[in-house]
């Protein structure tokens, strides 16, 4: 079941040319479109399904700096500022609130990791503090857990996945961008090593600049043009309750996370748990991902399913035939796994939610890189092509920052942050993989 999301209209006619074509209408593609249109570039945003239909509407909604890998902190700090600015500039409520995030744990190793991260927080002037056992218990009262402590990230917050990407895309359209949904990209038109167009199911758009922000589909799209992009997707489940008593705005425990939405309901998900499905793409890049698999072994379960054949990592890819894999999978919508069991756990742990009901549940694929840091990069060998993907579960909160940096690279403007930590080359040059936080 797909989560509820605001639907926006498409523009009627596909342009014959555009200054920039953006492939993928998630939070990254939408924000890049906004920043490029704001600078006066003509932008065509194309999406095989509808804007925000995949991971941008299937996440927790958290916008944070807390516990991030140091490589992500420059762009996460930028993203937090941009969330504030986008709400004011666009004039639509994106659900962004600096409500603070509260974490609690009964695991001494996890608490020690949070305490050690305070040194990183100080380097980047992040407002966070450790909670005592009593403070953690007061912040997140939970049956069957005796908290050793926790964290309160004071200035972090949340936004609303159901409305953010569509709202930002509409902001881009107000600045002149055009939006084209149900419009799959087949590939790039390349002349003498430079982009000269994008081939779509609705026709060719002539352009000299393309941003691929295709989420879980990015590696498969790149591979068609001989670009190696190590990417693996893990399958997760989330659910939304009906409006419920207010336990807090954004809470993390070892069992689950709860994020209060604008209507008083909660988005609920398991904390740090995911299913890695064996796929041909996963096998292709298995060596690159081995350090992550070893580090995250306790948080993953392994299996095989339809994704081995269908979807962005499966055997049923695409060649020159139509319909393409993009058209056969307008919305990547895996079935939720054990949503009822997740809800029952929440009812058991939080007595105030003992009678809460489920409104909807959904699955999603979180696209990861081997080091859990996104790729935001020009691509060697194809002039005019920029890649922004592999957000590793951080894409929603980081989205405005990633979109801004991607727009800078596409437009050849001065980068808003140093792009080197996000280069594609780091994953291809034999450098040691340093696995970041998930």
Image (cartoon, helix red, strand yellow):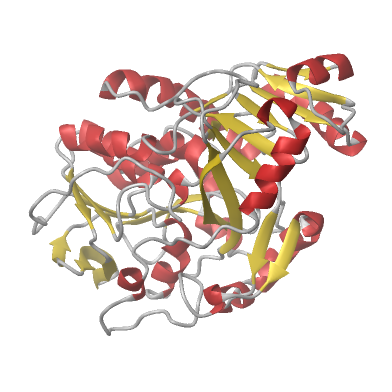
Residue at the image position 39 percent from the left and 57 percent from the top: 214
Vertical placement of 373 versus 379: above or below? Answer: above
Left or right: 377 as drawn, with respect to 107: left
Extreme residue toward the front, this view: 355
Residue 314 appears left or right of 291: left
Q: Position of residue 125 (x, y in %)?
A: 64, 17
Q: Quadrant of residue 255?
A: top right
6 up-or-down from 12: above or below: above
Q: Position of residue 2 (x, y in %)?
A: 43, 53
Would you say 326 lies left or right of 298 here? Answer: left
Q: Is residue 418 shown to the viewer in this render?
A: no
- Can residue 115 be seen by looking at this rendering? yes
What residue lies at 59% left-to-right and 59% top-to-bottom? 235
Residue 166, above or below 331: above
Residue 124: horizontal and vertical position, in percent? 64, 23
Where is residue 212, by image quadrant?
A: bottom left
In the image shown, does 283 or 160 lie closer to the viewer?
160
Residue nearest the observer in this picture, 158 or 268 = 268
Residue 355 vs 207, above or below: the answer is above
């Amino acid at each position: 079941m797909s989560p509820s999301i605001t639907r926006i209209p498409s523009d009627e006619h596909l342009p014959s040319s555009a200054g920039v074509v953006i492939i993928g209408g998630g939070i990254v593609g939408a924000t890049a479109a906004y920043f490029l249109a704001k600078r006066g570039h003509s932008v065509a945003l194309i999406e095989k399904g509808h804007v925000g239909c995949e991971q941008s509407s299937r996440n927790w909604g958290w916008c944070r700096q807390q516990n991030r890998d140091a490589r992500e902190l420059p762009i996460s700090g930028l993203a937090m500022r941009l969330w504030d600015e986008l709400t004011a500039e666009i004039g639509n409520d994106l659900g962004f609130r600096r409500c603070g995030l509260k974490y609690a744990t009964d695991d001494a190793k996890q608490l020690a990791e949070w305490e050690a991260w305070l040194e990183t927080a100080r380097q980047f002037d992040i407002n966070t503090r450790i909670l005592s056992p009593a403070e953690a218990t007061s912040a997140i009262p939970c049956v069957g857990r005796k908290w050793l402590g926790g964290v309160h990230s004071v200035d972090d917050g949340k936004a609303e996945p159901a409305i953010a990407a569509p709202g930002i895309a509409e902001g881009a359209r107000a600045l002149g961008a055009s939006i084209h949904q149900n419009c799959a990209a087949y590939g790039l038109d390349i002349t003498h090593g430079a982009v000269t167009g994008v081939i779509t199911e609705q026709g060719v758009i002539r352009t000299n600049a393309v941003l691929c922000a295709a989420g879980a589909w990015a590696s498969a799209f790149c591979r068609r043009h001989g670009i190696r992009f190590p990417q693996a997707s893990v399958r997760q489940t989330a659910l939304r309750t009906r409006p419920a008593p207010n336990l807090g705005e954004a809470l993390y425990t070892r069992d689950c996370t709860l994020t209060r939405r604008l209507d008083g309901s909660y988005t609920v998900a398991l904390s740090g748990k995911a299913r890695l499905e064996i796929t041909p793409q996963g096998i292709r890049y298995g060596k690159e991902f081995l350090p992550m698999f070893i580090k995250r072994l306790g948080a993953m379960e392994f299996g095989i399913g339809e994704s081995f054949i269908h979807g962005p990592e499966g055997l049923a890819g695409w060649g020159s035939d139509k319909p393409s894999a993009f058209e056969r999978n307008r919305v990547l919508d895996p079935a939720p796994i054990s949503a009822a069991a997740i809800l029952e756990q929440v009812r058991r742990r939080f007595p105030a939610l003992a009678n809460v009901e489920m409104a909807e549940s959904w699955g999603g694929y979180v696209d990861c890189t081997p080091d859990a840091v996104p790729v935001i990069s020009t691509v060697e060998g194809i002039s005019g092509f920029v890649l922004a993907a592999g957000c590793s579960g951080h894409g929603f909160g980081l989205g405005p920052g990633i979109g801004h940096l991607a727009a800078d690279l596409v437009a050849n403007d001065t980068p808003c942050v140093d792009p080197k930590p996000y280069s594609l080359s780091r994953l291809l040059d034999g450098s040691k993989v340093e696995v970041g936080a998930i």
